[in-house]
Image (cartoon, rainbow, N blue to C red):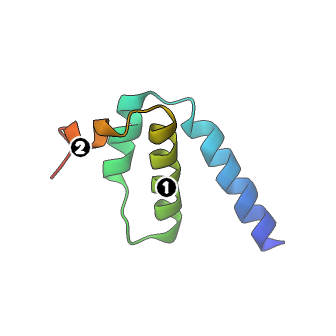
């Protein structure tokens, strides 16, 4: 049951992500903390969406890079 809720939540997050602009996705990616499991999943979804848009290079060229 918990697994189904987790999968459903992940799908809902992805549906929200695909409607965001490229720039907002990059900004969100850099604001997430990699030490939290839920945020790791969100980072993966953002990466997946940027790859599907052929915009992964925006992460490397972003001004958000520390």
Q: Is residue 14 above or below residue 33?
A: above
Residue lying at 73% horizontally and 60% vertically, measured from the top left:
7
Q: Report x, y in % for residue 56.
A: 36, 40
Q: Quadrant of residue 4?
A: bottom right
Q: Report x, y in % for residue 34.
A: 37, 66
Q: Are marks 1 and 2 in contact (CB under 8 Å)?
A: no
Under tag 2, what secondary structure? helix
Q: Report x, y in % for residue 30.
A: 31, 50
Q: What whole-number distance in Å separates the C-alpha atoms at marks 1 and 2?
A: 16 Å
Q: Is residue 1 left or right of residue 29?
A: right
Residue lying at 53% horizontally and 64% vertically, measured from the top left:
38
Under tag 1, what secondary structure? helix
Q: Is residue 31 left or right of residue 7?
A: left
Q: Farthest residue in the right direction?
A: 1
Q: Report x, y in % for residue 60.
A: 23, 43
Q: Is residue 62 visible?
A: no
Residue labelled with disc 2: 60
Residue labelled with disc 1: 44
Q: Is residue 56 visible?
A: yes
Q: Quadrant of the N terminus?
A: bottom right
Q: Is residue 39 above or below residue 30?
A: below
Q: Is residue 35 left or right of residue 1?
A: left
Q: In the rendering, which numbered label is found on residue 18?
A: none
Residue lying at 45% horizontally and 54% vertically, measured from the top left:
43
Residue density around tag 2, few if under 14, some if 14–19, many if 20 or more, within 10 Å = few
Whichever of callouts 1 and 2 sits on the residue coming sooner in the sequence is 1
Residue lying at 48% horizontally and 31% vertically, measured from the top left:
53
Residue density around tag 1, few if under 14, some if 14–19, many if 20 or more, within 10 Å = some
Q: Is residue 38 above or below residue 43?
A: below
């Amino acid at each position: 049951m918990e697994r189904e809720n987790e999968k459903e939540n992940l799908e809902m997050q992805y549906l929200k992500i695909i409607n965001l602009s490229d720039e907002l996705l990059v900004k969100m990616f850099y604001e997430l903390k990699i030490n939290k499991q839920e945020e790791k999943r969100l980072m993966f979804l953002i990466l997946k969406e940027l790859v599907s848009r052929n915009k992964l290079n925006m992460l490397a060229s972003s001004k958000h890079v520390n």
